[in-house]
Image (cartoon, helix red, strand yellow):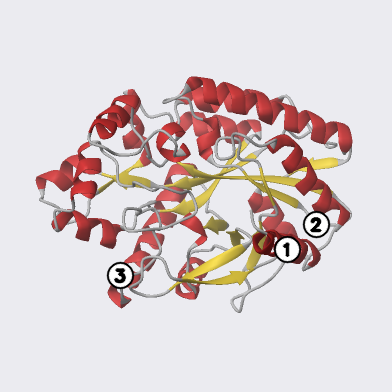
Amino acid sequence: MNKLNQLKRAYLRWYVNTRGWRTNRQVLVLESDDWGSIRTPSNDAIDRLSLKGYQTKDFPYLKYDTLESKQDLLDLYAVLARHTDRNGNPAVITANTIISNPDFAKLKANGFSKYEYELFPETQKRYFGASFLDTFKEGMDAGVFYPQLHGMHHVNIDRWMEKLRAGDQTALDLFEEEMFDYSTSHTTIDENSFVDALTPKDGSDLAAQVDYLGVAAAHFEELFGFQSSTFIAPCYIWLPEHERALKQLGVTGIQSGAYQKHPRMGSVNVFKKEIHYTGERNALGQVYTTRNGLFEPSLFESEDVVAQALASIERAFENKKPAVLSTHRINYVSGLRPENKERTLALLDQLLAEVRRRWPNIEFMHSAALNKQLLEA
């Protein structure tokens, strides 16, 4: 990393840890995106793409990320339940959930003339022969897993469908494997990346995105039995129009990375960045929570992610801020590389044990609970 980027990161860390709501309580929030969504269905799919010349070995999301299994959830729950806070509550994952996935069979049948989707329990049935929504609820009952809304889908429908209709070879090759994204970086959106669900092409596309947010919120309540009070946008890309729609749906909290990316209408990868901080309110009265740390062992395999996460937590507490760590679903699934999940769960176990040792007054909290604290402040 060059000196300019180091200075930018240092400024960002300083900004998000010195603005907004403060507390003497030592609060740790683990925010985990992408539950329910697909990425790579199998190692066979990877092998077939490799034979066609696609780079697949060095990109973590292609190599590790896939739909979670029932056993993946149970193994994660077991690690979280081993670590309790000062109040006797277990460590908890805020499971930011994608409600649906593309229905590839229907899309193929209609010749890409109309987008079709299936709810994630139906995707579970295709992958594993049965839905295990009840396992999500078991985690909720145990206090270790708390779903919140991540969106209707993790695909930019308009741009993806346009590529498929145009006969784009990369899009079609991935479609045949029931995939929709070929990204070469987890931070960069390009012509072969379609995970940015809320980048609108034009006004009608934006209106469709707003409509889908309403559908997603309704399905979320139907599936889980309660309204999601917070929302995190795929890829941290969203617009004020999305916030207004979410407000009407009862969403009072916006989870955010260190900054929001405002997309330029019609552009694939031109964004205006806006830094947010925990406790900041927008004009609608919604409150932001900003991630001020990472625990992403699958994305940064060569780094000491436990030490880095602990340093982030310490910085947050020194500034009387809650520690809000990003830790994506990719770290906790075993469908492609079981050994990776074993490694990452061991690191999570190590992290939580050290957190409990260093900060005996730690409080584990999910994002909806933190949002409630901020609204009442």
Query: Quadrant location of residue 296?
Result: top right
> In the rendered image, which residue does mark 3 sit on?
205
Query: Is any part of residue 66 visible from this angle?
Result: no
Residue 22: x %, y % from top left: 83, 62
Q: Earlier in the sequence, mark 3 or mark 1?
A: 1
Find out whether the residues at labels 3 and 2 contact each other: C-beta distance under 8 Å: no
Residue 202: x %, y % from top left: 31, 75
The Cα–Cα distance between marks 3 and 1, rounded to whole angstroms, is 32 Å
Query: Quadrant location of residue 69?
Result: top left
- Amino acid type at image mark 1: Val
Q: Residue furthest front?
A: 2
> In the rendered image, which residue does mark 1 sit on?
16
- Amino acid type at image mark 3: Asp
How packed mark 1 is, by other alpha carbons closer than 10 Å (few <14, some 14-19, many 20 or more), is many
- Check disc 3 and report its element: helix, strand or loop: helix
- Amino acid type at image mark 2: Lys
Residue 332: x %, y % from top left: 54, 31
Which residue is at the front of the view, 322 or 46?
46
Name the residue located 30 percent from the left edge and 70 percent from the top edge. 205
Name the residue located 35 percent from the left edge and 53 percent from the top edge. 193
Q: Is residue 4 left or right of residue 86?
A: left
> In the rendered image, which residue does mark 2 sit on?
321
Q: Which mark is residue 285?
A: none
Residue 17: x %, y % from top left: 78, 61
Find out whether the residues at labels 3 and 1 contact each other: C-beta distance under 8 Å: no
